[in-house]
Image (tube, grey):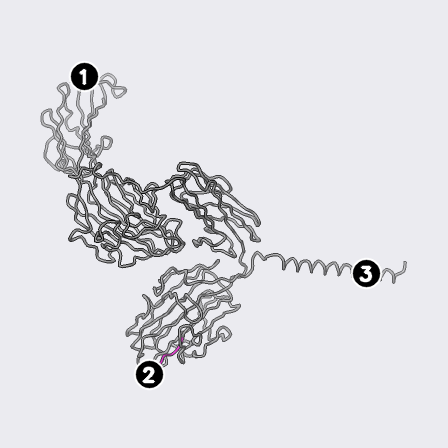
Amino acid sequence: MNVGTLHKGSDRSAVRLWLAHMFLCLLAVLFSLATPNAAIAQTFTADWTNLGVGSIQGVPSGASVTAGPRTVTVTHTEITDGGPFENFYGTEMLNYFNGTIGTQNGTLLYSMDNDTFDPDDRFESVFSFNSGVTDLSFAVAHVDSGTSPRSDGVTIEYDTGTGIWQNIRSVPATYTLGAVVGNATLSGVQGFVGTGSAGGLTSTTGNINVDFGAISVQRVRITYHFGQNQTGNPAGNLQYMGLSDFTFEVPGTPISDLSLAKTVSNATPLNGSAISYTLSLTNSGPVAETNVLVEDILPAGFSFTGATGFGSYSTGTNLWTVPNIASGQTRSITISGTVTAPAGVTITNFAEVFSQTNFDTDSTPGNGSTNEDDDASRSFTVQGTRTAGIAPNFDSICPVVNQTLFDWNTAGVTWASGTLNNNYTVANIGTINFALSNTGGTYDDGSPEDNSNNTGGLAATEQSLYQNLQFDNRTQVATTVLTLPTAVPSLQFTVFDIDFAANDFADKLTVTGSFNGAAVMPTLTNGVVNYVVGNVAIGDGGSNSDSANGNVVVTFSSPVDTITIQYGNASTAPADPDGQAISIHDINFCNPATTLSVTKISSVVSDPVNGTSNPKAIPGATIEYCILISNAGSATASSISAADTLPGNVTYTAESMQSGSNCGSAATSEDDDATGADENDPFGASISGTVLTATAANLGPAEGYALTFQVTVD
């Protein structure tokens, strides 16, 4: 064999192997370029708008913003060495500002009114991430010096997670300064001060631009120092600076891209017909998702009957739980129900991905958006024509002679602007309490207030309890609770201005009642621009404040002692509704009344022959009686006395009387005479000859008094 030939052949084999290896490597590179990375660094923005406070409104210490997989919590404190120390703009020293400072619209605004200079007065704010981030960047804007003797000062520090603060002045590569910003030492800390005027709000000459690059940051501390570089007191009070949103990266973030679609089985159903929604969730991302929650709050007008498909749906939480969904997979569920909305009503059902494990590249779960691919909505319109309803005739429920009207126009009935709790004394009833509260949003336009802003088509001077609300989302509600001193048999009132404005608001009114803690449901009667489903009224058309079109009449036709009125938005409202208002008009009460009834039952306890086993009413037998006095009315009965004469063929068993609220629980011993403490604990009982007497000082609505005693058959 020729060795040289063998060597040459080996060379060619090696070359072929090398070429094959290089080809596979090239394929691997191309594949890596073409295939999305399931866990790469993603850029996120902590948007201060999402703090949920109004413009020039204070940011509460402890408020937080979620941006992708990170949450930024803002805490702050004032540090003073004495002297005047208060904010100038807004309600606190740190406010949200829906305007532009530097180059960004929607910043945090630091402001100070410090006419008496103290170099150690400062405002410290800490921004804490729930875990470290990289490439964190932001701008502190409008750090400058005014024409009067005052100058802004600021120190900026960071913590990498060790708990030790480090100063960015020690890492010059992390910041750049605008033309009117210079270095300084402030309260012993290296920082920055304004050296000249920055000019208008949109100028960047007073900016401190911060970029931490590859440094992992978990906390940032920004301290605002007031009135620096001066020899006297500040002559002006316009001391402020801005803070832009935080932009940062989170390495190794798992990526998904969930999208939601919804269909409805019938877009024009009849009232009472069956209908269904189908939700379809698709994962277009590179990795699987687990434990996805899709929120679908079923609208009033659709009564749930069941759900079939992948995962499960709960009407208690309004959530469709999707245990898993692979990359490229679609999961679906069908939610079935019955149309309960009246004719002419359009019902819109909105659904959105509420939470997911991975980060979504183009949408934010649970943010209430209506224009992202993780939300979907469908509507159906009930066939037929809707007209204003006819409210129950209150005179047929309660005779006019038994009615008492609470009138907001009555002299002495006032509601001080902005107050949330008031009491009013009403003839025949007593003192009624009105208590107002809200789960978010703010009262506006001087409300709550007793005024004539809404008249419901009545006289222009007709007054009512006016409430104007600025809600931040569809879930917030304002609640009015009426607590009566005693129950009334029935009542009726009208709520004005339940209506709708496209891309503005969708009024939703929910009214419930209770009697001795048990739920009582009213009858709601709709106007032209709203519809009623059960105890809920929803606006779906526009109405003027002086029109009856938005009226909803509320009627309780059975005893009630507490009324709860909730006002908010239906699902057809935008994610951030605009201002909206209602007015609660006069209340017509049916005067409280007592309705007493007496029942008497007996049972054989034992006899001389059978003992307690199937005893008979034979001579010598013991019989137990129970007398039950009940108040089915809505008023408290007082000075109650009932007498019972024993039949001639029985003998009363001495000291056998017991009292209680019902026959089964009568266990309080009553002696046989009519004196002593047992006569009012809270019931009394005595016997004289063959006549038993039962007494009670008071018996409230739905209360009862039971007296048991035993006799022997002669």
Q: Are marks 1 and 3 in contact (CB under 8 Å)?
A: no
Q: Does dot 2 land on a helix, a strand or a loop?
A: loop
Q: Distance between the residues labelled 1 and 2?
A: 112 Å
- Residue beneath the point at 30% across and 57% down: 443
- Residue beneath the point at 29% across and 58% down: 444
Which residue is label 2 attached to? 231
The x, y position of residue 339, in whole percent, is 40, 39
- Left or right: residue 338 versus residue 358 is left
Q: Is the magenta stretch mostly helix, strand or loop?
A: loop
Q: Which of marks 2 and 3 is nearer the N terminus?
A: 3
Q: Can residue 519 be seen in this view?
A: no
Classed neighbour count for the residue bearing mark 2: other residues with Cα under 10 Å, few (<14), some (14–19), many (≥20): few
Q: What kind of residue is marked 1?
A: Pro
**Would you place residue 77 above or below residue 576 in this image?**
below
Q: Which of marks 1 and 2 is nearer the N terminus?
A: 2
Which residue is label 1 attached to? 619
Q: Does dot 3 land on a helix, a strand or a loop?
A: helix
Q: Is residue 146 magenta?
A: yes
Q: How far apart are marks 1 and 3 (CA)?
A: 126 Å
Q: Does the magenta stretch include residue 208?
A: no
The magenta region covers 143-147
Q: Are marks 2 and 3 in contact (CB under 8 Å)?
A: no
Q: What kind of residue is marked 3?
A: Arg
The x, y position of residue 171, in whole percent, is 49, 74
**Would you place residue 277 above or below residue 607 in this image?**
below
Q: Which mark is residue 280?
A: none
Q: What kind of residue is marked 2?
A: Thr
The x, y position of residue 355, in whole percent, is 47, 51
